[in-house]
Image: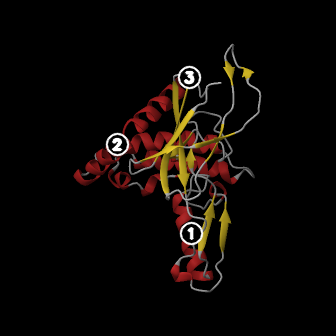
Amino acid sequence: MIRPWCCLRFEDGTVHGRVQQVDNFTPPFNLDRRWVGEASFVLPTDLPLGYHRLHLRSRGIETSAALIVMPDWLGLPEQLGARRAWGLAAQLYSVRSEQSWGVGDLIDLTDLAVWSAARHGADYLLVNPLHAATPTLPMEPSPYLPTSRRFFNPLYLRVESIPEFAGLAKRGRVRRLRDDVQQRAGKLDAIDRDSAWTAKREALRLVYRAPRSAGRELAYAAFREREGKALDNFAVWCALAEKYGGD
């Protein structure tokens, strides 16, 4: 029997030699005309904290996986001292105001955080995941089924708070889009993401075409450079999904 070889490469580049293999009597199985087996290894208990890689080689095939080692306990912020803390939990899409586009947004989140802290002494605000959903209709209603966890859902943007909106020649068009969504939302008991996103997407396209200041253009370029290929791939996928469907 050929025994696989396994090692750890720490985030500083150093390598921890051969990791101890232990018995695993799970029988191999046939997966698409290829025999697949299991192997078990025991990791050392004194690994340093950090983001490491676990490397495995078997029968000429090599693969690796992330190994994250974190502390057992992070502790509490010093500013809390010995007192207890409390806060609110909210599904942001339901925290809508008279100014939002039928769906709660980041400005509503800011207002809720300030109100709960200033008026009631809240220490934190817990919200649903704000990750990106498929940019097609019908929009996925669950925030726990995102398309990407690297990027955020633009549905939560407040269009009027984007700096370029102030100099937009078609502000009236954006306000009409908002008014139509607000009127529709006022007649419904449910959250209408599809109407909100359809209107907000058109408004965001108008704002995107507005001239940016030198500083804003530099910030935008820095964002694209920082996110790199992942942002390019996600943008291309969004465009393809918009044209051909989210699947």
What number is the disc on residue 74?
1
Q: Quadrant of the N terminus?
A: top right
Q: Residue 33, located in which quarter of the rendered image?
A: top right
Q: Which residue is mark 3?
A: 59
Q: Earlier in the sequence, mark 3 or mark 2?
A: 3
* Residue 224, numbered label: 2
Q: Nearer the viewer, mark 1 or mark 2?
A: 1
* Real-space Cα separation, disc 1 to disc 2, in angstroms: 33 Å
Q: Secondary structure at mark 1?
A: loop
- Mark 3 is on which residue type? Arg
Q: Residue at x 73, y 50 (%)?
A: 188
Determine the secondary structure under disc 2.
helix
The picture places residue 173, in percent across and down from the top left corner, at 45, 44
Tell me the distance, in whole angstroms, between the alpha carbons under discs 3 and 2: 41 Å
Amino acid type, callout 1: Leu
Contact? badges 1 and 2 (CB < 8 Å): no
Q: Nearer the viewer, mark 3 or mark 2?
A: 3
Q: Which mark is residue 150?
A: none
